[in-house]
Structures are given as C-alpha cells and as structure tokens.
Image (tube, rainbow, N blue to C red):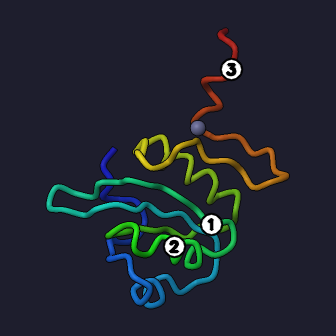
Amino acid sequence: MSDAHFGEGPYHLSAQALDNIVTRNCPGTFVLGEHTDDGFHVDYVGRSDTDVNARLHGHVGKYRHFRFDYTTDAEAAFAEECSLYHDYQPEHNTAHPSPPLGFAWSCPRCLPKRSPPA
Ligand SMILES: [Zn+2]
C-alpha cells in the first residue's frame, strides 16, 4: 500500500518535534523509519494505548522520521497498529501486535484467515 496517506507527517523524530507536534495526550499509532524522495520506508510500527507522545519519546535517537495518527481509544489504536503491521511488515517488529493485557481483541486483518473454510 502507499504510505502517503497514513496519519500526519513525516516529521523528524526529535524530542522537540514531538512536543511541538504531538500535543494531545491520547491513544494513537505511529510508523518509524526513513523518509526519502522515494517515500517513507517503514522500519517499525507502534502504538500507545494512553499517550502516543510518551511512547514516541522512547524511540528518539533510534529512527530519523515518524508519521503518527491519534485514535479515539486504545481499541482503535490496536486495530490500526495491526493494519499498519500487515501493510508494511516492518523489519523491526519481531512479533504481531498484541492487545493490552487482559483484553481479547482480535486483529481485524488476521481474523478472516482463521475462519474455517465454507
Ligand atoms: Zn493480524
């Protein structure tokens, strides 16, 4: 899929940029990687169930650029992270996203494959 339409950005990943740009303390998703003339190469996708700004701060220094999107709640963040994971298959994500501890949400993209054949 084209990565031109996910969220806002690309922006340089720095503490200052995060605090200037990601100003709402709410759930959200993000992609991290390198933006070039050819587009955004996604190395990693992630989310925060509570505060996407804080989560992004943890990645400062590890990646050059980010795009991000706020979500209405943690469940939406999980679903969107799953979609990003399937779209980009990022090299640095070693495992499929998991729902928060204690929640049994299913990945919207994996679910159809698990259905028994008709
Ligand atoms: Zn999945």
Instruction: Give the residue displayed 59% in from the left and 78% down from the top.
Output: 54
Q: Quadrant of ligand 1?
A: top right
* Residue 50: image location, x then y, percent: 69, 72
Determine crowd level at label 1: few under 14, some 14-19, many 20+ residues with C-alpha closer than 10 A. many
**Tag 1–tag 2 contact (CB < 8 Å):** yes
Q: Which mark is residue 56?
A: 2
Instruction: Give the residue displayed 60% in from the left and 23% down from the top.
Output: 113
Say which residue label 1 marks: 48
* Residue 91: image location, x then y, percent: 40, 45
Q: Give the image quarter of residue 28.
A: bottom right
Q: Is residue 44 above or below residue 18?
A: above
Secondary structure of residue under mark 2: helix
Instruction: Give the residue displayed 30% in from the left and 58% down from the top.
Output: 4
Spatial separation of the CA atoms under disc 3 and disc 2: 35 Å
Determine crowd level at label 3: few under 14, some 14-19, many 20+ residues with C-alpha closer than 10 A. few
Q: Give whichever of discs 3 and 2 has the lower sequence position.
A: 2
* Residue 45: image location, x then y, percent: 48, 55
Tell me which amino acid carries mark 1: Ser
The answer to whether residue 102 is left or right of residue 96 is: right
* Residue 16: image location, x then y, percent: 41, 90
Viewport quadrant of the C terminus: top right
Instruction: Give the residue displayed 28% in from the left and 62% down from the top.
Output: 34
Q: Is residue 4 above or below residue 52?
A: above
Viewport quadrant of the N terminus: top left
Q: Nearer the viewer, residue 112 or 90?
A: 90
Q: Which mark is residue 103?
A: none
Q: Is residue 69 above or below residue 89?
A: below
Spatial separation of the CA atoms under disc 3 and disc 1: 29 Å
Say which residue label 3 marks: 115
Tell me which amino acid carries mark 2: Leu
